[in-house]
Amino acid sequence: MTKYREALSLIVEELKKLSNETERVGILHSVGRVLSLDIISDIYLPPFNTSEKDGICISYNPQITEWDLVGEITAGNYSDITISSNQTISVMTGAKIPESADTVIPFEDLNVIEDEVYLKEGAKVKSGQNLILRGSIIKQNEKAINKNTFIKNQDIALAAACGADMIEVFCKRKIAILSTGDELVDIYKTPANAQIRLTNNSTVLSLIKSIGANGINLGIVRDNPELIRKSLEDAFDSEADIVIISGGTSNGKHDFVKKVFYEMGVEIKFNCVKIKPGAPTIFGTYLTKSGTKLLFGFPGNPISTFLCFLIFIREAFSMAQLCQPPSRIDAVLKNKIRKKGNNRTFLLGRIIYNRKIKQYCVFPTHTWFSQNIDALSKSNCIIEISAGKMNLKKGDTVNCIHF
């Protein structure tokens, strides 16, 4: 059995080896993408000395507390006025400040009577206050946002200020999902007899989208080794970088996936992980004419497939800087947990912030009934319990992975 962290390291190592093609996208389409080139500012930011507040600008002299008002400058409307130490100009926030001024005093510290301005009693003035100097944020031709940055909404203002209307990013990874099972029917069909609707493909496709990749739905394949092989060959011939097959990874009589992997020449990196659920997870690589493909085999039950995608693929993407890292939160356990076995365990839970005690609390929603998708729907986190810990009691602190 491979330990979880070792398995994750193997995935990240292979993920980083995949070829990285790039493309240019408009700034409004860059959120959720990964920069393939640094963003360099084409100008100084700010491009001129500017006021941080509404007020007056002066040439600082600690002996002077009253000034003659000789003009006004608003944002976007600059007047090149030269002032002496006993003269001043009213300025608005963001206004360009003339070179003869070096300090801004906010209006709340002033009394203004027609064209005369007086410093209020008790108000303090320091040289250079409320003045943002040209280039104090970013210099011209300076790096503003680093290559390999996962672009977030809060990065857009800086990118736009640097003139980056088109942004160079890595192409989205393409991930294909295939499910195996004689009992499966498409979601638009009504199940008959011993059939159930296929939910894993829809779940995985939504998760693929959430990590900024493109999903490919390869549908259902029956529990037949030849059909599984043919479906995998088709998957490897597709444009997918990564192929996931859900179901058939255990060692049961009708579990053929591992056998087919070996027969096809897949280089298996691991085929059993010391975790619960998800122990029979398989990971390997397959060399095709177009390059190496990564291949995952996940257990077919819905909760295991969901958890395996998050703890293996999303986590690996995060470690390889291909997606936003998941939020990890320490929370107080509200119900005891009886852990089965000594494996690292991942359980579904629902985390909330308790304002009364000013702490995060988590309620386990997981049941060992793997088809309980109702519990999955009520969850918003994974409770991670390390291999060394056994039963946990109410009030213990646990680490939770938010989703």
Image (cartoon, rainbow, N blue to C red):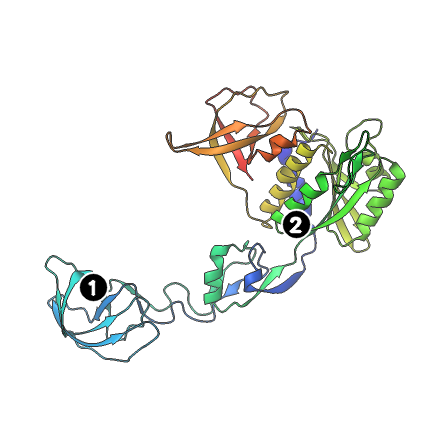
> x and y percent of residue 57 in the render?
22, 70
Tell me the quarter of the picture where residue 21 sits: bottom right
> x and y percent of residue 239 in the render?
76, 54
Circle 1 crowding by C-alpha within 10 Å: few under 14, some 14–19, many from 20: some
Horizontal side of residue 105 vs 359, given as left or right: left
Pick the quarter of the image with the C terminus.
top right
Tell me the quarter of the picture where residue 366 sits: top right
Q: Which residue has dot 1 on it?
A: 107
> x and y percent of residue 162 in the render?
47, 67
> x and y percent of residue 398 in the render?
50, 28
Q: Observer-nearest residue: 206 or 395?
A: 206
Q: Which mark is residue 16?
A: 2
Element type where label 2 sits in the image? helix
Residue at (65%, 45%) from the top-left corner?
Answer: 206
Horizontal side of residue 227 vs 7, given as left or right: right
Q: Is residue 193 visible?
A: yes
